Image (spheres, grey):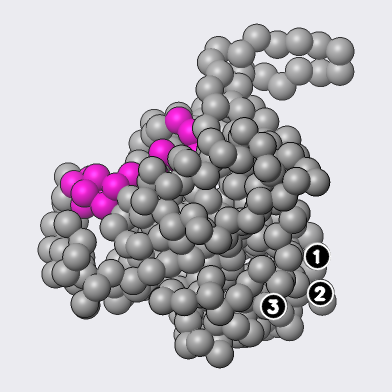
Amino acid sequence: MGKKPHVLSIGHLNLDIYMKVDNIPRPDEAVDAYETYTGGGGSGANFSVAISRLGLRSRFLGSVGNDQFGDVLIDELRREGVDVRFIKRVSHDRTGTVLVLVGLDGSKRMIRYAGANLGLTPDDITSDVLEGVSHVHVALGRVEIIDMVKRLSKSLGVTMSVDGGSPLAKKGLDVISEVMSGVDVWFMNSFEARELGKSDNVVRAAHNILNRVMVKELVVTLGPRGAMLFRDGEIKYSDAFKVVPVDTTGAGDVFAASYIVARLLGLDPMDRLVFSNAAASLKVSRRGARSAPTLREVLDFLSSMGYTKLVDDIVTRLPSDVT
């Protein structure tokens, strides 16, 4: 491979406020937090940081308020090496904010205020934003944004992935089947797959989805049980690496970014899952949505787990300007 690919991520950019608790308060009840911390969040922005840390060029498109939080979040992305030139600033609303309640087992519950994130419109998806981009990832459930990206990316010969989360899953296949058909990679978690596919069995649910939607690859993350890939009529499964969970916030974003990196490097499907599971496992052992590992950290982790052949293969495939 020549120079490293450029990956565009489109989605939310938020201020995350974390509270670590051992139970959720009932009405009129207060509980004590063991720890509190803040940091940048938003699935699209988390993805862009992970891409940069994994060694590829990263660009982000989103919308924030014309406020202090927006300034801080943009500066944070810039320091991570993310191209922030196309981030939209709006004055009619505040920067998005998320309250994250983190359990002692690392699980999370979130209360979201979308705010200025909703200022992003299909008109903001232009050929200038996609200039020089090899792959575009949409971390939104808004079908009008997905449709615009799909049409423009196809005209430019750019591959595309979507992680629409629960907002997309709740729309149902009757609403989203047409707009999602033709997408290269669709990421979802097991809950979203069961909801969309109308089955408690994840495999059956995935097949029900693929009977309605023509996507090249459907990737279903299973949390601590790993991930599954449905591709060309085959199913690939890779178990998660066992780590002590600290905070699972952003783990799916790290997994998706790692999978796209592995796909752009030309790794085979099973190796993509192993690489992505390794990166996500490292993330959940750290607090905060932006604690994605670097490429070197993932390669060292894989080596320690006995995947030296995979590490050697990755190193030989790296672009010449990745160190």
- Cα separation, mark 2 vs mark 3, equals 12 Å
**Type of the residue with mark 3:** Asp
User: Is 148 part of what is drawn in magenta?
Assistant: no
Q: Position of residue 67 (x, y in %)?
A: 66, 37
Which circle marks residue 175 in the picture? 2
Which circle marks residue 171 in the picture? 1
Q: Are marks 1 and 2 in contact (CB under 8 Å)?
A: yes
**Type of the residue with mark 2:** Val
Relative to 221, say whether 134 is above or below.
below
Which circle marks residue 147 in the picture? 3
Q: Residue at x 76, y 10 (%)?
A: 30
Relative to 318, say whether 16 is above or below.
above
Q: Position of residue 157 (x, y in %)?
A: 48, 88
Q: SS for tag 2? A: helix
**Type of the residue with mark 1:** Lys
Q: Residues within 10 Å of mark 3 (few under 14, many from 20)?
A: some
